[in-house]
Amino acid sequence: MALVLVTALLVFAAIQPMLQGNQERFSELGVLGPAQTIGGYPTSVVAGSPFLLYGYIGNHEGTASLYQLLVKVGNESTVVTNSTYARAPTILSYTHVLGQNQSVTFPLNLTLSQPGSGIRLVFELWTYDVTNASYQYSGLWNQLFLNVTSH
Amino acid sequence: MVWSNKRALWLVLALALVAMLAVGRADPASAVTPGEVTSANDLIQSGFASAHQAERSGGNVTALVADLNEAIQLVQEAVVQNATDPAGAAADLGNATHLAQAVAAESPSFGRTGLADRQATEETSIGAAVAVVSAASLVYLFGERVYLVVWLRLYKDYVVRPADG
Protein backbone atom coordinates (compact mmCIF):
# COMPACT_ATOMS: atom_id res chain seq x y z
CA MET A 1 0.00 0.00 0.00
CA ALA A 2 2.80 2.38 0.95
CA LEU A 3 4.60 1.44 -2.27
CA VAL A 4 1.53 2.30 -4.35
CA LEU A 5 1.12 5.63 -2.59
CA VAL A 6 4.76 6.63 -3.00
CA THR A 7 4.70 5.56 -6.65
CA ALA A 8 1.56 7.58 -7.36
CA LEU A 9 3.06 10.66 -5.74
CA LEU A 10 6.30 10.36 -7.67
CA VAL A 11 4.50 9.84 -10.98
CA PHE A 12 2.32 12.90 -10.30
CA ALA A 13 5.43 14.95 -9.54
CA ALA A 14 7.09 13.71 -12.74
CA ILE A 15 4.22 14.71 -15.03
CA GLN A 16 3.53 18.01 -13.26
CA PRO A 17 5.39 20.11 -15.91
CA MET A 18 3.06 18.71 -18.59
CA LEU A 19 -0.15 19.67 -16.81
CA GLN A 20 -1.80 22.92 -17.80
CA GLY A 21 -2.66 25.30 -15.00
CA ASN A 22 -6.37 25.19 -14.27
CA GLN A 23 -6.67 28.78 -13.11
CA GLU A 24 -9.57 31.12 -13.62
CA ARG A 25 -9.01 33.39 -16.62
CA PHE A 26 -9.97 37.03 -16.43
CA SER A 27 -9.01 40.58 -17.32
CA GLU A 28 -9.02 43.67 -15.11
CA LEU A 29 -10.15 47.20 -15.83
CA GLY A 30 -9.75 50.10 -13.45
CA VAL A 31 -10.13 53.86 -13.62
CA LEU A 32 -7.96 55.81 -11.22
CA GLY A 33 -8.01 59.43 -10.14
CA PRO A 34 -5.36 62.03 -10.94
CA ALA A 35 -3.16 60.70 -8.12
CA GLN A 36 -3.32 57.17 -9.57
CA THR A 37 -5.45 56.02 -6.66
CA ILE A 38 -9.02 54.82 -6.32
CA GLY A 39 -10.41 58.18 -5.31
CA GLY A 40 -10.07 61.87 -5.96
CA TYR A 41 -12.18 61.67 -9.09
CA PRO A 42 -13.34 64.99 -10.48
CA THR A 43 -17.06 65.73 -10.21
CA SER A 44 -16.98 68.91 -12.24
CA VAL A 45 -14.76 69.97 -15.13
CA VAL A 46 -14.61 72.97 -17.43
CA ALA A 47 -15.59 72.50 -21.05
CA GLY A 48 -12.55 72.66 -23.28
CA SER A 49 -10.10 72.27 -20.40
CA PRO A 50 -8.16 69.02 -20.20
CA PHE A 51 -8.29 66.88 -17.07
CA LEU A 52 -6.35 63.82 -16.10
CA LEU A 53 -7.41 60.33 -15.08
CA TYR A 54 -5.53 57.05 -15.20
CA GLY A 55 -6.55 53.71 -16.62
CA TYR A 56 -5.49 50.30 -15.39
CA ILE A 57 -5.64 47.03 -17.33
CA GLY A 58 -4.54 43.61 -16.09
CA ASN A 59 -4.23 40.39 -18.04
CA HIS A 60 -4.83 36.97 -16.44
CA GLU A 61 -6.22 35.28 -19.54
CA GLY A 62 -3.47 32.67 -19.74
CA THR A 63 -2.04 34.16 -22.94
CA ALA A 64 -0.97 37.54 -24.27
CA SER A 65 -3.93 39.81 -25.06
CA LEU A 66 -4.37 42.86 -27.25
CA TYR A 67 -6.58 45.33 -25.37
CA GLN A 68 -8.33 48.51 -26.38
CA LEU A 69 -9.81 50.88 -23.82
CA LEU A 70 -12.50 53.16 -25.23
CA VAL A 71 -13.66 56.29 -23.45
CA LYS A 72 -17.14 57.34 -24.52
CA VAL A 73 -19.28 60.32 -23.65
CA GLY A 74 -22.87 59.54 -22.80
CA ASN A 75 -25.55 60.70 -20.44
CA GLU A 76 -27.82 59.22 -17.78
CA SER A 77 -29.89 57.38 -20.38
CA THR A 78 -26.91 55.73 -22.05
CA VAL A 79 -27.22 51.96 -21.71
CA VAL A 80 -24.13 49.93 -20.92
CA THR A 81 -24.03 46.47 -19.34
CA ASN A 82 -21.72 43.47 -19.18
CA SER A 83 -23.14 42.31 -22.51
CA THR A 84 -24.02 45.61 -24.21
CA TYR A 85 -21.51 48.29 -25.00
CA ALA A 86 -22.52 51.94 -24.98
CA ARG A 87 -23.82 53.48 -28.17
CA ALA A 88 -22.07 56.78 -27.60
CA PRO A 89 -19.27 58.73 -29.29
CA THR A 90 -15.71 57.68 -28.49
CA ILE A 91 -13.44 60.53 -27.43
CA LEU A 92 -10.30 58.53 -26.68
CA SER A 93 -8.91 55.08 -27.27
CA TYR A 94 -5.86 53.40 -25.80
CA THR A 95 -4.35 50.20 -27.22
CA HIS A 96 -1.86 47.93 -25.48
CA VAL A 97 -0.62 44.34 -25.61
CA LEU A 98 -0.19 42.60 -22.26
CA GLY A 99 1.50 39.28 -21.59
CA GLN A 100 0.13 36.80 -19.09
CA ASN A 101 -0.03 38.30 -15.57
CA GLN A 102 1.08 41.71 -16.83
CA SER A 103 -0.69 44.96 -16.07
CA VAL A 104 -0.35 48.56 -17.15
CA THR A 105 -1.35 51.94 -15.73
CA PHE A 106 -1.56 54.78 -18.23
CA PRO A 107 -2.68 58.43 -18.30
CA LEU A 108 -5.98 59.44 -19.85
CA ASN A 109 -5.86 63.08 -20.92
CA LEU A 110 -9.49 63.96 -21.50
CA THR A 111 -11.25 67.07 -22.71
CA LEU A 112 -15.01 67.54 -22.89
CA SER A 113 -16.14 70.19 -25.30
CA GLN A 114 -19.84 70.51 -24.53
CA PRO A 115 -21.12 71.87 -21.19
CA GLY A 116 -23.87 69.95 -19.44
CA SER A 117 -24.90 68.18 -16.26
CA GLY A 118 -25.06 64.44 -15.74
CA ILE A 119 -22.43 63.80 -18.37
CA ARG A 120 -21.45 60.17 -18.15
CA LEU A 121 -17.97 59.03 -19.10
CA VAL A 122 -18.04 55.35 -19.99
CA PHE A 123 -14.83 53.31 -20.01
CA GLU A 124 -15.04 50.04 -21.93
CA LEU A 125 -12.45 47.31 -22.32
CA TRP A 126 -12.30 45.54 -25.66
CA THR A 127 -10.05 42.60 -26.51
CA TYR A 128 -8.79 41.51 -29.89
CA ASP A 129 -10.28 38.20 -30.94
CA VAL A 130 -7.77 36.40 -33.14
CA THR A 131 -10.40 34.03 -34.52
CA ASN A 132 -12.68 36.80 -35.76
CA ALA A 133 -9.84 39.25 -36.45
CA SER A 134 -11.70 42.04 -34.68
CA TYR A 135 -12.05 43.65 -31.28
CA GLN A 136 -14.79 42.20 -29.07
CA TYR A 137 -16.41 43.88 -26.08
CA SER A 138 -15.04 42.16 -22.98
CA GLY A 139 -18.01 43.07 -20.80
CA LEU A 140 -15.79 45.08 -18.47
CA TRP A 141 -16.79 48.71 -18.10
CA ASN A 142 -16.66 51.59 -15.70
CA GLN A 143 -18.24 55.03 -15.50
CA LEU A 144 -17.78 58.50 -14.10
CA PHE A 145 -20.51 61.13 -13.81
CA LEU A 146 -19.45 64.71 -14.37
CA ASN A 147 -20.88 68.17 -14.57
CA VAL A 148 -19.27 70.09 -17.38
CA THR A 149 -19.37 73.83 -16.83
CA SER A 150 -18.83 76.47 -19.45
CA HIS A 151 -16.15 78.29 -17.44
CA MET B 1 0.38 100.30 -69.68
CA VAL B 2 -1.44 97.31 -71.15
CA TRP B 3 1.80 95.44 -71.55
CA SER B 4 2.71 96.14 -67.93
CA ASN B 5 -0.63 94.80 -66.67
CA LYS B 6 -0.25 91.61 -68.69
CA ARG B 7 3.24 91.15 -67.40
CA ALA B 8 2.07 91.57 -63.81
CA LEU B 9 -0.75 89.09 -64.38
CA TRP B 10 1.65 86.48 -65.76
CA LEU B 11 3.94 87.04 -62.83
CA VAL B 12 1.12 86.50 -60.34
CA LEU B 13 -0.03 83.36 -62.16
CA ALA B 14 3.50 81.99 -62.23
CA LEU B 15 3.96 82.63 -58.52
CA ALA B 16 0.59 80.99 -57.75
CA LEU B 17 1.58 77.95 -59.81
CA VAL B 18 4.90 77.62 -58.01
CA ALA B 19 3.16 77.93 -54.63
CA MET B 20 0.58 75.29 -55.57
CA LEU B 21 3.30 72.90 -56.72
CA ALA B 22 5.26 73.44 -53.52
CA VAL B 23 2.25 72.81 -51.31
CA GLY B 24 1.16 69.87 -53.42
CA ARG B 25 4.58 68.29 -53.14
CA ALA B 26 5.17 68.87 -49.44
CA ASP B 27 1.90 67.53 -48.10
CA PRO B 28 1.14 64.20 -49.75
CA ALA B 29 4.76 63.14 -49.79
CA SER B 30 5.19 63.24 -46.01
CA ALA B 31 1.78 63.52 -44.31
CA VAL B 32 0.14 60.42 -42.90
CA THR B 33 -3.28 59.53 -44.28
CA PRO B 34 -6.04 57.78 -42.29
CA GLY B 35 -5.69 54.84 -44.66
CA GLU B 36 -2.03 54.46 -43.78
CA VAL B 37 -2.84 54.54 -40.07
CA THR B 38 -5.51 51.87 -40.57
CA SER B 39 -3.04 49.80 -42.56
CA ALA B 40 -0.44 50.07 -39.79
CA ASN B 41 -3.03 49.07 -37.17
CA ASP B 42 -4.02 46.09 -39.32
CA LEU B 43 -0.38 45.02 -39.46
CA ILE B 44 -0.11 45.30 -35.67
CA GLN B 45 -3.20 43.12 -35.27
CA SER B 46 -1.75 40.63 -37.73
CA GLY B 47 1.52 40.64 -35.80
CA PHE B 48 -0.37 40.03 -32.57
CA ALA B 49 -2.22 37.09 -34.14
CA SER B 50 1.13 35.57 -35.14
CA ALA B 51 2.59 36.12 -31.68
CA HIS B 52 -0.54 34.63 -30.11
CA GLN B 53 -0.14 31.51 -32.24
CA ALA B 54 3.53 31.27 -31.26
CA GLU B 55 2.58 31.49 -27.58
CA ARG B 56 -0.01 28.74 -28.00
CA SER B 57 2.80 26.58 -29.37
CA GLY B 58 4.71 27.20 -26.15
CA GLY B 59 6.92 30.08 -27.25
CA ASN B 60 8.03 32.85 -24.93
CA VAL B 61 6.66 35.93 -26.68
CA THR B 62 7.73 38.59 -24.17
CA ALA B 63 10.04 40.26 -26.70
CA LEU B 64 7.34 40.19 -29.39
CA VAL B 65 4.85 41.81 -27.00
CA ALA B 66 7.35 44.59 -26.30
CA ASP B 67 7.86 45.18 -30.03
CA LEU B 68 4.11 45.32 -30.65
CA ASN B 69 3.68 47.88 -27.89
CA GLU B 70 6.46 49.97 -29.39
CA ALA B 71 4.69 49.81 -32.76
CA ILE B 72 1.39 50.88 -31.17
CA GLN B 73 3.16 53.77 -29.46
CA LEU B 74 4.71 54.89 -32.73
CA VAL B 75 1.33 54.88 -34.50
CA GLN B 76 -0.20 56.96 -31.72
CA GLU B 77 2.68 59.42 -31.90
CA ALA B 78 2.35 59.60 -35.67
CA VAL B 79 -1.33 60.50 -35.40
CA VAL B 80 -0.63 63.19 -32.81
CA GLN B 81 2.26 64.85 -34.62
CA ASN B 82 0.84 64.53 -38.14
CA ALA B 83 -0.46 68.10 -38.12
CA THR B 84 2.76 69.68 -36.84
CA ASP B 85 5.47 67.37 -38.18
CA PRO B 86 4.19 65.35 -41.15
CA ALA B 87 7.62 64.03 -42.05
CA GLY B 88 8.23 62.81 -38.50
CA ALA B 89 4.78 61.25 -38.44
CA ALA B 90 5.47 59.41 -41.68
CA ALA B 91 8.78 58.16 -40.30
CA ASP B 92 7.11 56.94 -37.10
CA LEU B 93 4.42 55.16 -39.06
CA GLY B 94 7.06 53.55 -41.26
CA ASN B 95 8.94 52.32 -38.19
CA ALA B 96 5.71 50.99 -36.68
CA THR B 97 4.92 49.13 -39.88
CA HIS B 98 8.41 47.68 -39.98
CA LEU B 99 8.16 46.53 -36.35
CA ALA B 100 4.77 44.89 -36.85
CA GLN B 101 5.99 43.09 -39.95
CA ALA B 102 9.09 41.92 -38.10
CA VAL B 103 6.91 40.49 -35.29
CA ALA B 104 4.81 38.59 -37.82
CA ALA B 105 7.96 37.28 -39.51
CA GLU B 106 9.73 36.24 -36.31
CA SER B 107 6.74 34.65 -34.57
CA PRO B 108 6.94 31.26 -36.32
CA SER B 109 10.52 30.70 -35.10
CA PHE B 110 9.43 31.58 -31.54
CA GLY B 111 6.64 29.04 -31.93
CA ARG B 112 8.99 26.35 -33.22
CA THR B 113 11.39 26.93 -30.31
CA GLY B 114 8.52 26.73 -27.85
CA LEU B 115 7.20 23.57 -29.45
CA ALA B 116 10.63 21.93 -29.25
CA ASP B 117 10.97 22.96 -25.58
CA ARG B 118 7.51 21.62 -24.81
CA GLN B 119 8.28 18.30 -26.51
CA ALA B 120 11.53 18.00 -24.56
CA THR B 121 9.66 18.69 -21.32
CA GLU B 122 7.02 16.09 -22.16
CA GLU B 123 9.64 13.50 -23.05
CA THR B 124 11.49 14.13 -19.79
CA SER B 125 8.28 13.93 -17.76
CA ILE B 126 7.10 10.73 -19.43
CA GLY B 127 10.56 9.19 -19.09
CA ALA B 128 10.66 10.03 -15.39
CA ALA B 129 7.17 8.59 -14.85
CA VAL B 130 8.08 5.37 -16.67
CA ALA B 131 11.25 5.09 -14.59
CA VAL B 132 9.30 5.52 -11.35
CA VAL B 133 6.73 2.89 -12.32
CA SER B 134 9.47 0.50 -13.45
CA ALA B 135 11.37 0.95 -10.22
CA ALA B 136 8.21 0.41 -8.19
CA SER B 137 7.41 -2.77 -10.12
CA LEU B 138 10.90 -4.12 -9.52
CA VAL B 139 10.63 -3.34 -5.85
CA TYR B 140 7.26 -5.08 -5.71
CA LEU B 141 8.49 -8.20 -7.54
CA PHE B 142 11.98 -8.59 -6.15
CA GLY B 143 12.15 -6.21 -3.26
CA GLU B 144 11.69 -8.74 -0.49
CA ARG B 145 14.13 -11.21 -2.01
CA VAL B 146 16.78 -8.54 -2.50
CA TYR B 147 16.22 -7.32 1.02
CA LEU B 148 16.74 -10.80 2.45
CA VAL B 149 19.87 -11.42 0.40
CA VAL B 150 21.34 -8.12 1.47
CA TRP B 151 20.40 -8.79 5.10
CA LEU B 152 22.06 -12.18 5.01
CA ARG B 153 25.24 -10.72 3.51
CA LEU B 154 25.37 -8.00 6.09
CA TYR B 155 24.78 -10.29 9.01
CA LYS B 156 26.51 -13.47 7.79
CA ASP B 157 29.09 -13.33 10.57
CA TYR B 158 26.62 -12.43 13.24
CA VAL B 159 26.48 -14.98 16.05
CA VAL B 160 23.42 -15.21 18.18
CA ARG B 161 24.30 -15.62 21.83
CA PRO B 162 21.95 -16.22 24.67
CA ALA B 163 21.50 -13.17 26.87
CA ASP B 164 22.83 -14.96 29.96
CA GLY B 165 25.64 -16.85 28.18
Image (cartoon, helix red, strand yellow):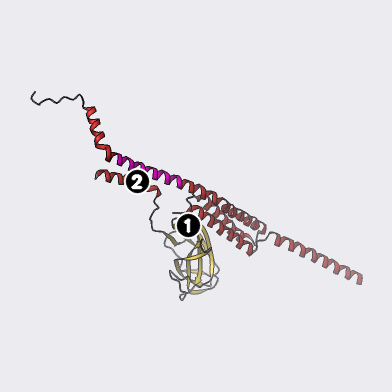
Quarter holding the C terminus of chain B? top left
1 and 2 marks on the same chain: yes
Helix, strand or loop for the magenta stretch, by majority: helix
Residue B111 visible from this viewpoint: yes
Q: Which residue is mark 2?
A: A13
Asked if the magenta segment contains residue A131, the reply would be no
Quadrant of the rendered image containing residue B12: bottom right
Describe the element under mark 2 as helix, strand or loop. Answer: helix
Q: Which residue is mark 1?
A: A105
In this rendering, the answer to whether A79 lies above or below B42 is: below
Gap in angstroms between the C-alphas marked 1 and 2: 38 Å
In this rendering, the answer to whether A111 lies above or below B48 is: below
Residue A6, numbered circle = none
Q: Residue at x 50, y 66 (%)?
A: A71
Q: Residue at x 80, y 65 (%)?
A: B17
Neighbor class of circle 1 (other Cα within 10 Å; few <14, some 14-19, many 20+) is some
Q: Nearer the viewer, mark 1 or mark 2?
A: 2
Where does the image place residue A18, in percent across and percent down from the top left? 40, 49
Quarter holding the N terminus of chain B? bottom right
The region drawn magenta spans B118-138
Chain ID, mark 1: A
Describe the element under mark 1 as helix, strand or loop. Answer: strand
Where does the image place residue B153, in percent across and percent down from the top left? 24, 27
Amino acid type of the residue tagged 1 in the rendering? Thr
Amino acid type of the residue tagged 2 in the rendering? Ala
Q: Residue at x 36, y 43 (%)?
A: B130
